[in-house]
Image: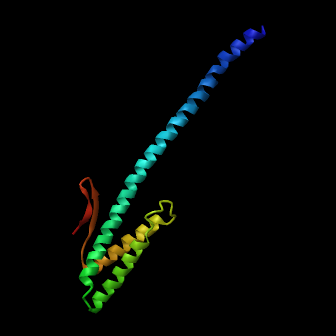
Amino acid sequence: MAGSQDIFDAIVMADERFHGEGYREGYEEGSSLGVMEGRQHGTLHGAKIGSEIGCYQGFAFAWKCLLHSCTTEKDSRKMKVLESLIGMIQKFPYDDPTYDKLHEDLDKIRGKFKQFCSLLNVQPDFKISAEGSGLSF
């Protein structure tokens, strides 16, 4: 009788056993897919941020060359804001994706960029598209 009891226990417990095995297999597969999707998302998001910062940097360096010889009071204010923008861009932590204030610093750079564009009386529009990224005026 004890042997037949074990057979019935195996049948009754099969549902729980299969549920546990399915959970473990699903968890392992989901974990590996999650890592791959996370890398893809991180790469894409990092590329967008890098493209945006690079565009701001190129814009700032071009204007630094253009404003270098100007000496009016308005131009000195523009140069101060421009130097501040360049300093913020150079201090941006490109190599540390775990930096706690990454988005805060990026927002500050965007704000300083908008301030500088306001001083120049230009309306920039930074866009990222399939063809590439850039500023339009």
The structure residue drawn at horizontal position 31% and vertical position 78%, both measured from the top left corner, is 116
Image position of 137 (left or right of 95): left
Please state the horizontal and vertical placement of residue 62, each as a whole percent of the image: 26, 76
Please state the horizontal and vertical placement of residue 134, each as a whole percent of the image: 26, 63
Image quadrant containing the N terminus: top right
Q: Residue furthest left?
A: 137
Question: In the figure, 8 relative to 78: above or below?
Answer: above
Between 23 and 87, which is closer to the camera in this rendering? 87
Quadrant of the rendered structure where residue 68 is? bottom left
Image position of 23 (left or right of 48): right
Question: In the figure, 83 relative to 96: above or below?
Answer: below
Quadrant of the rendered structure where residue 18 is? top right
Image quadrant containing the C terminus: bottom left
Quadrant of the rendered structure where residue 20 is? top right
The structure residue drawn at horizontal position 35% and vertical position 66%, both measured from the top left corner, is 53
The structure residue drawn at horizontal position 46% and vertical position 65%, both measured from the top left corner, is 102
Please state the horizontal and vertical placement of residue 101, each as a whole percent of the image: 49, 66
Please state the horizontal and vertical placement of residue 42, each as a whole percent of the image: 42, 53
Image position of 25 (left or right of 48): right
Count of numbered tags: 0
Question: In the figure, 10 relative to 46: above or below?
Answer: above
The structure residue drawn at horizontal position 28% and vertical position 87%, both measured from the top left corner, is 75
